[in-house]
Image (cartoon, rainbow, N blue to C red):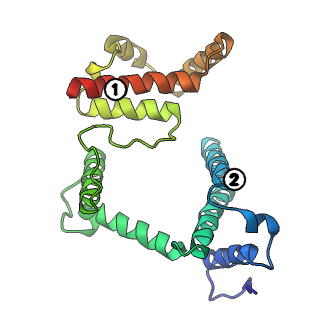
């Protein structure tokens, strides 16, 4: 039986959380927690991320603390399941991300100190190190595309934003079937309130027209990505 050390000063709160989760998954624990798998928890993970984003939008620090705890629970939950299956554990997760941060910040931890002082340079160096890592693992994939591997489940709005950002960064956004003059005109005097209103009104218009705004934007953004890749081929 797992013993929960609630008041032992030598046990960190993170360790305590891990022990609680192990106990919940044990034969003496909770039936619901025992039944969960990586697959059944995916919806919970999405919901917790959404609620965390809401707390950030609301600038509610008390709520953000709570939601980050719920999000951390999902990580610990998946780590415990993986540990039981003999795949990896929380220490492996922490070690992996720590090593990655050190590798991908050679300008901070490595022999490139003082060579980078701009945010864009940091992003470029991160991507370079990432590509080098994949090459060493034999997973270079198709690095010819400026879009590389965008997250497959990225929300349509972020998907479109990332596509345009990457295309603009290497000055190939003009290859898209867009009117740059119109974009420049729309961007003048644009602020968060105006942008929010315009997007909301467009979503409402899609609703009245029987269109799915998420699907519509994803479809159009995908076509723009293909147009750029075709032009660069």
Q: Which residue is mark 2?
A: 63
Please give left or right for residue 184 compared with residue 192 in the image.
Answer: left
In this rendering, the label closer to the viewer, 2 or 1: 1
Labelled pair 2, 1 in contact (Cβ < 8 Å)? no
Name which of mark 2 and mark 1 comes first in the sequence: 2
Residue 226 — which label?
1
Give neighbour class at mark 1: few <14, some 14-19, many 20+ (Cα, 10 Å): some
Please give left or right for residue 186 compared with residue 157 in the image.
Answer: left
Q: Secondary structure at mark 2?
A: helix
Please give left or right for residue 139 compared with residue 195 in the image.
Answer: left
> Which image quarter holds the C terminus?
top left
Give neighbour class at mark 2: few <14, some 14-19, many 20+ (Cα, 10 Å): some
Q: Position of residue 215 (x, y in %)?
A: 55, 25
* Nearest to the observer: residue 86 or residue 41: 86
Q: Position of residue 75 (x, y in %)?
A: 59, 63
Q: Secondary structure at mark 1?
A: helix
> Which image quarter holds the N terminus?
bottom right
Q: Quadrant of residue 18?
A: bottom right
Residue 164 — which label?
none
Q: Which residue shows up at 55% across the image and 18% down it?
A: 198
Please give left or right for residue 166 compared with residue 71 in the image.
Answer: left
**Whether residue 86 is situated above or below residue 63 in the rendered picture:** below
**Whether residue 56 is situated above or below residue 23 in the rendered picture:** above
**Whether residue 136 is situated above or below residue 205 in the rendered picture:** below
Q: CA distance from mark 2 to mark 1?
A: 41 Å
Q: Position of residue 120 (x, y in %)?
A: 28, 44
């Amino acid at each position: 039986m797992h013993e929960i050390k609630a008041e032992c000063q030598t046990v960190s709160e993170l360790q305590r959380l891990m022990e609680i989760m192990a106990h919940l998954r044990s034969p003496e624990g909770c039936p619901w927690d025992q039944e969960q798998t990586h697959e059944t928890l995916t919806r919970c993970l999405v919901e917790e991320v959404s609620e965390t984003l809401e707390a950030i939008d609301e600038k509610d620090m008390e709520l953000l603390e709570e939601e980050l705890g719920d999000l951390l629970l999902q990580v610990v939950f998946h780590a415990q399941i993986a540990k039981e299956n003999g795949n990896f554990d929380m220490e492996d997760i922490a070690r992996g991300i720590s090593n990655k941060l050190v590798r991908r910040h050679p300008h901070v931890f490595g022999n490139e100190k003082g060579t980078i002082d701009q945010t864009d340079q940091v992003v470029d160096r991160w991507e370079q190190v990432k590509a080098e890592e994949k090459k060493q693992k034999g997973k270079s994939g198709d690095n010819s595309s400026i879009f590389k591997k965008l997250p497959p489940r990225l929300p349509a709005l972020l998907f479109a934003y990332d596509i345009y950002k990457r295309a603009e960064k290497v000055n190939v956004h003009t290859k898209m079937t867009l009117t740059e003059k119109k974009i420049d005109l729309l961007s003048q005097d644009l602020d968060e309130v105006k942008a929010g209103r315009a997007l909301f009104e467009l979503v409402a218009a899609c609703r009245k027209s029987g269109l799915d705004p998420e699907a519509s934007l994803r479809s159009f953004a995908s076509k723009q990505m293909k147009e750029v890749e075709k032009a660069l081929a």
